[in-house]
Image (spheres, helix red, strand yellow):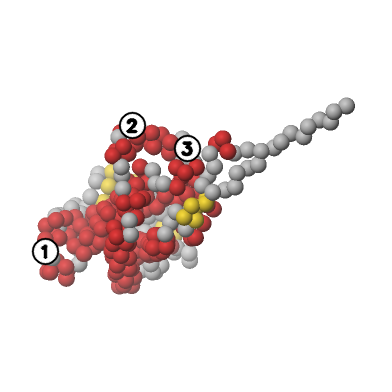
């Protein structure tokens, strides 16, 4: 009687690794993450000193603010235009760790320092504003000279097609991430978001920050004309900051969904493991 043949189980292909992130990109990524967090928290402390935003040249308590975070004797609220939202316990009126009622716009756990100090908030903010400006300048120069912009962020003609962009939107909505060699390259939504952050939002933050400085108003008054006044620059600065927060949150969600171990490891070591194609998974 012939012996039954042992079925041959195909071996899984060895994982393929590619060098995805060069050292300057990795250094700037982590430095930027820490810098922006400290800028946000110190910026919220500065905002607490006058939690209102205006358009134009001037802004004071008697002027109409398009955004205000405030409190009544019993509640906290955020007002955007004519729309008022109750935010008791979160913004405007909240309870600190010792059980005391506070009426700052943003709570102490979200600010640097945690206790109210406009002077210290400004010191922290100015220090890390310099870190942001210098590191961004060096990173942009490296991206241009080192080929990062041309190799990784340049949007090809075919990628501008509405059909291509819409397909990428649908893939993200359905959580269909690139696999195989396609996973090693940035897709159109990644390129547009990274270009928007590096070349629009971060320079905008720096420019509007300079516009709010009285010293710069004397040496570069054209900044006031560009943004329509110091208060308009302050409003744009605030909106750009929260646009960066939104980018960070979406970025974090995408990392978690795409595989956090592989994604974080690649941003630490530079090496990225390509997700196998569907027909290679067993």
Task: Identify the residue position indicated by label 1 in the image.
Answer: 221
Question: Would residue 242 be visible to someone looking at this image?
Answer: no
Secondary structure of residue under mark 2:
helix
Q: Which residue is mark 2?
A: 163
Q: Give x and y (percent) for residue 94.
A: 41, 58
Q: Residue furthest right?
A: 1
Residue 176: assigned label: 3
- The image quadrant of residue 28 is bottom left
Cα separation between marks 1 and 3: 49 Å
Quadrant location, the N terminus: top right
On screen, residue 232 versus residue 51, left or right, reads left
Q: Closest to the observer: 74 or 39?
A: 39
Task: Classify mark 3: helix, strand or loop.
Answer: loop
The residues bearing labels 2 and 1 have C-alpha atoms spaced at a distance of 44 Å
Residue ID at (23%, 50%): 66
Q: Nearer the viewer, residue 170 or 128?
A: 170
Which image quarter holds the C terminus?
top right
Dot 3 crowding, Cα within 10 Å, few <14, some 14–19, many 20+ = few
Of callouts 1 and 3, which one flags the residue occurring earlier in the amino acid sequence?
3
Q: Nearer the viewer, residue 10 or 139?
A: 10
Q: Vertically, is 277 above or below 197?
A: above
User: Can the viewer see residue 90 in this picture?
Assistant: yes
Sequence-wise first label, 2 or 1: 2
- Tell me which residue sits at (20%, 57%) in the image: 233
Q: Nearer the viewer, mark 2 or mark 1?
A: 2
Which label's residue is closer to the chain start, 2 or 3? 2
**For the residue carrying disc 1, how many other residues have a C-alpha within 10 Å: few (<14), some (14-19), or many (20+)?**
some
Q: Position of residue 227 (x, y in %)?
A: 16, 55
The residue depicted at 47 percent of the width and 44 percent of the height is 181
């Amino acid at each position: 009687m012939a012996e039954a043949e042992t079925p041959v189980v195909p071996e899984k292909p060895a994982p393929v690794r590619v060098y995805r992130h060069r050292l300057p990109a990795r250094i700037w990524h982590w430095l930027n993450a820490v810098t922006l967090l400290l800028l946000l928290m110190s910026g919220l402390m500065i905002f607490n000193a006058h939690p209102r935003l205006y358009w134009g040249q001037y802004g004071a308590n008697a002027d109409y603010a398009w955004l205000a975070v405030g409190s009544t004797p019993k509640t906290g609220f955020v007002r955007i235009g004519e729309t008022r939202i109750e935010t008791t316990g979160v913004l405007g009126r909240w309870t600190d760790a010792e059980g005391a009622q506070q009426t700052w716009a943003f709570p102490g756990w979200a600010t640097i320092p945690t206790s109210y100090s406009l002077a210290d908030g400004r010191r922290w903010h100015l220090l890390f504003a310099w870190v942001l400006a210098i590191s961004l300048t060096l990173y942009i120069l490296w991206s241009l000279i080192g080929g990062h912009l041309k190799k990784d962020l340049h949007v090809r003609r075919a990628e501008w097609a509405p059909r291509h962009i819409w397909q990428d939107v649908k893939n993200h909505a359905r959580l269909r991430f690139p696999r195989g060699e396609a996973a090693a390259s940035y897709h159109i939504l990644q390129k547009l978001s990274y270009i928007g952050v590096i070349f629009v939002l971060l320079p905008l933050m720096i420019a509007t920050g300079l516009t709010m400085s009285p010293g710069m108003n004397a040496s570069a008054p054209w900044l006031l004309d560009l943004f329509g006044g110091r208060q308009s620059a302050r409003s744009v600065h605030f909106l750009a900051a929260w646009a960066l927060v939104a980018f960070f949150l979406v970025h974090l969600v995408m990392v978690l969904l795409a595989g956090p171990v592989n994604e974080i490891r690649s941003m630490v070591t530079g090496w990225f493991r390509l997700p196998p194609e569907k027909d290679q998974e067993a």
